[in-house]
Structure formats: C-alpha cells, structure tokens
C-alpha cells in the first residue's frame, strides 16, 4: 500500500510510529488529508519540534527518495531548479576545438550540443518532478520563511502545475507527483496564497508524557527516571520565555549527554555542567543560571 492509499488517521499514526515518529492526532490528520488529497503539507512551529523529522519519516515509510531544498536568504531559481554545468560545457568546446570539429560543424550545432541534458544540473525542484516511477519522492522545502517573497511566489507557481520549463530543452511535467512537505519557523508571515494551496498544521512542542516516549524511542539507553526528569525540565524551560527554547532534538541530546557522563538522576551540578547541550544561546543560559536550578529540580522530582 502506497502512502496516498493510507486508509485512516489511525493508520498514519501506526505507520509513523514504525519510523520512530510519534505523531499526535492533529498532526496525523493533517498528514492523512495531505496524502489523500495530494496537496502539500505546510508545517509551522518553533525550531526543534519535529517538522523536518516528519518529512524524513514519510520518506522512509514510502521507501522513496527524500529530496531536500534548504531555503535561505537570497535563494533563487538557479539554486532551486536547475543550472548549466559551465565547466563541462567549456570542456566540451575545447575538446571540439582540439579535435578539429569546429571546422566541420556550424556554430548553431555546437551551441545546441552545449544545451543538452548531459550538461544539466538538476536542483531539488527539478529532481522532484523528474521522477517517473513509484514510489513518489518526498520533497522537503525546509524553512521557507528564510526565503524572500519573490521566491515564495515562484514556488507557488511550480506547486500549482508541477511543471518546469527550461527554454533550451522544453517543459518537464511530473509523472509521479512528489509528496511535498514545507516547513517554516515563522520568522516572517507567509503569504495567504501559499497557505491556501497547502494543508496547514501548527506543530507544538510535545507534552511531557509524549516527550518521555520520544526520548525512550530515540535514545533507548536513557533510563525511564532520567527521561522523565529531562522532559519535565525541558517543559519548564520552554515556559521561561527564552530566546531559543529547547526543542525535542536538544532534549534527546541532553538526555544522551547525561547518560554519557554517568548521570541517572538530575542534580544541580549535572544540570549546570551540561546546560550547553540543551540551551544554545549564552543569554538564555545566563537567564537560567541567574534564576537558579532549585525550582527545576523541585519540579522534576515531583511524582
């Protein structure tokens, strides 16, 4: 059974759990609708809540390729769609000159040879719509909020038609539509037109119980008691209005770091010594240390 044939929300939860991804029902419903109606899935939320990891899990479930377009400020169509391999084109011309072919063929013929598929560098968007056989690839467009408005509009056009025109070669149309996952950390607002094109879901940090499950799955060497304490501490820190609250990935790293140094029960020294594993900004660390660790330790030791 392919991803797009999945029968229910419960089946989505089950299949994702086999990839060690624990989705709540709201997220699983958004995934189900996106798959069944063949529309992009737009995930917004703070960094570290599992948006990118979901795309990886879908790719593993589909047993298809994960094609990732990492967005950044200034990205344009050349980085996203295709480029010509100028070095190889130049080498082709020099080889033609060295062999004497330039005397025997016209300039138009040589130019035509330069714009052949063998000199085409396929970037993620072109790669994704060039797949001809199942399983469909998962196209991850990561951190779209880092790109500018013009690129967002360009992306919307491609996702509407699933086709790309290269002037020298013609139009490429998708035969197997990719499963599209778009993520945003909401550093800026996205256009309503893009949101209308997608199924939208805001991804929250997991609650304590779910985070304990995640830690136990992702870091099986972490004892249950330590997983509980780490999850409670992370939840407390997320409520402190930090510049960068810890995400799930940082929580897992912290738990594994504690196990590595031989800690199986949090205390003030172990929290202080490993705080940099969990909190990545100096100002946030200073805020946590200035408040002290007594409150955190009191919370995590509650039954």
Image (tube, rainbow, N blue to C red):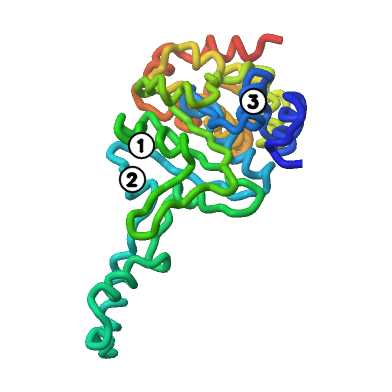
**In the visual, does 86 lie left or right of 29?**
left
Residue at 52 percent of width and 42 percent of height: 139
Residue at 67 percent of width and 9 percent of height: 302
Which residue is labeled 3 in the image?
Answer: 33
Q: CA distance from mark 2 to mark 1?
A: 8 Å
Residue 41 image offset from top left, x and y in percent: 55, 29
Which residue is labeled 1 in the image?
Answer: 154
Q: CA distance from mark 3 to mark 1?
A: 25 Å
- In the displayed structure, 116 sits above or below 27; it is below
Residue density around tag 1, few if under 14, some if 14–19, many if 20 or more, within 10 Å? few
Residue density around tag 3, few if under 14, some if 14–19, many if 20 or more, within 10 Å? some
Label 1 element class: helix
Q: Which numbered disc flags the more N-terminal residue, 3 or 2?
A: 3
Which residue is labeled 2 in the image?
Answer: 77
Q: Nearer the viewer, residue 193 or 165?
A: 165
Q: Is residue 272 visible?
A: no
Q: Nearer the viewer, residue 103 or 141?
A: 103
């Amino acid at each position: 059974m392919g991803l797009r044939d999945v029968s229910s929300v419960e089946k989505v939860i089950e299949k994702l759990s086999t990839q060690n991804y624990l989705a709540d029902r709201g997220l699983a419903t958004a995934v189900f609708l996106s798959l069944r109606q063949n529309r992009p899935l737009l995930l917004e939320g703070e960094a570290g809540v599992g948006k990118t990891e979901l795309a990886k899990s879908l790719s593993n479930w589909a047993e298809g390729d994960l094609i990732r377009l990492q967005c950044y400020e200034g990205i344009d169509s050349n980085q996203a769609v295709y480029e010509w391999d100028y070095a190889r084109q130049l080498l082709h011309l020099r080889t033609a000159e060295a062999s004497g072919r330039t005397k025997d063929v016209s300039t138009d013929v040589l130019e035509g040879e330069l714009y052949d598929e063998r000199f085409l560098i396929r970037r993620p968007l072109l790669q994704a719509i060039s797949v001809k056989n199942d399983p469909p690839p998962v196209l991850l467009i990561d951190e779209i909020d880092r790109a500018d408005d013009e690129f967002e509009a360009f992306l919307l056009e491609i996702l509407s038609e699933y086709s790309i025109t290269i002037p020298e070669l013609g139009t490429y149309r998708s035969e197997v539509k990719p499963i599209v996952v778009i993520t945003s950390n909401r550093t800026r607002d996205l256009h309503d037109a893009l949101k209308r094109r997608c199924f939208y879901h805001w991804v929250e940090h997991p609650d304590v119980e779910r985070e304990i499950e995640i830690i136990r799955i992702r870091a099986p060497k972490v004892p249950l008691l330590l997983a509980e304490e780490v999850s409670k501490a992370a939840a407390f820190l997320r409520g402190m209005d930090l510049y960068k609250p810890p995400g799930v990935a940082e929580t897992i790293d912290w738990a594994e770091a504690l196990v590595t140094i031989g800690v199986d029960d949090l205390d003030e020294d172990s929290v202080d010594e490993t705080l940099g594993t969990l909190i990545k900004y100096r100002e946030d660390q200073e805020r946590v240390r200035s408040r002290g660790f007594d409150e955190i330790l009191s919370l995590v030791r509650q039954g």
